[in-house]
Image (spheres, rainbow, N blue to C red):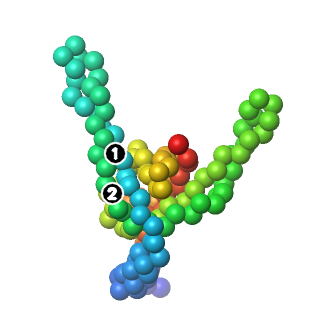
Amino acid sequence: MSVPADPFISQGARDSLRALAERSMLSTCNIHRYTPGPPNPDNSPGDQIESVQTGIPCRFSEGLLRGVETLVELRITGEARYSLRLPLGTDVRDSDVIEIGGRRYEIMADTIGRTQTTSINLSLHLLT
């Protein structure tokens, strides 16, 4: 029994699915990246430098995807997780902060670098 060279969908079908995924991205977001600045004269760490990519097309799901229960002051509280899809090839790292509608989100998980995907899927947690 021979194994096909490419067991997944064809490149043309993948490109069509990616285009369809990008057409569904009706919102925009900003990606903030913090990098350490040069050291101070006393050799202490320098202030962080922020770079911002603006107007990145995205699809944001503002629903509760997975709750995490924690005991806070004798009460069980939930922690909301949000989902964000970005076009493939977007310069995003798991250490970046995503801003959507004035609120900032931390990336909790991602699909960066996975094969056979039509978009980058990020799981987010609300910061502010």
Left or right, 9 with reference to 44 = right
The residue depicted at 31 percent of the width and 54 percent of the height is: 53
Q: In 3D space, how far apart are the residues under numbered discs 1 and 2 (Cα atoms)? A: 12 Å
The residue depicted at 36 percent of the width and 47 percent of the height is: 32
Residue 61 seen in render: yes
Mark number, residue 33: 1
Q: Amino acid at mark 1?
A: Arg
Left or right, 82 with reference to 20 = right
Residue 17 seen in render: no
Between circles 1 and 2, the one closer to the viewer is 2
Left or right, 58 with reference to 72 = left
Crowd tier of the residue under label 1, counting other residues whose Cα lies within 10 Å: few below 14, some 14–19, many 20 or above: some
The residue depicted at 46 percent of the width and 60 percent of the height is: 111
- In the image, residue 28 sits, relative to residue 98, either above or below, namely below
The quadrant holding residue 78 is: top right
The residue furthest left is: 41
Q: Percent from the top left, x then y, of residue 69?
A: 72, 43
Left or right, 35 with reference to 122 = left
Label 1 SS: strand
Mark number, residue 95: none
- In the image, residue 1 sits, relative to residue 47, either above or below, namely below
Q: Are discs 1 and 2 less than 8 Å apart at CB? A: no
- In the image, residue 46 sits, relative to residue 112, either above or below, namely above
- In the image, residue 50 sits, relative to residue 85, either above or below, namely above
Q: Percent from the top left, x then y, of residue 88?
A: 36, 67
Chain-order first, disc 1 or disc 2: 1
Q: Percent from the top left, x then y, of residue 17?
A: 43, 81
The residue furthest top is: 42
Which residue corresponds to mark 2?
A: 54
Q: Amino acid at mark 2?
A: Thr
Crowd tier of the residue under label 2, counting other residues whose Cα lies within 10 Å: few below 14, some 14–19, many 20 or above: few
The residue depicted at 72 percent of the width and 38 percent of the height is: 70
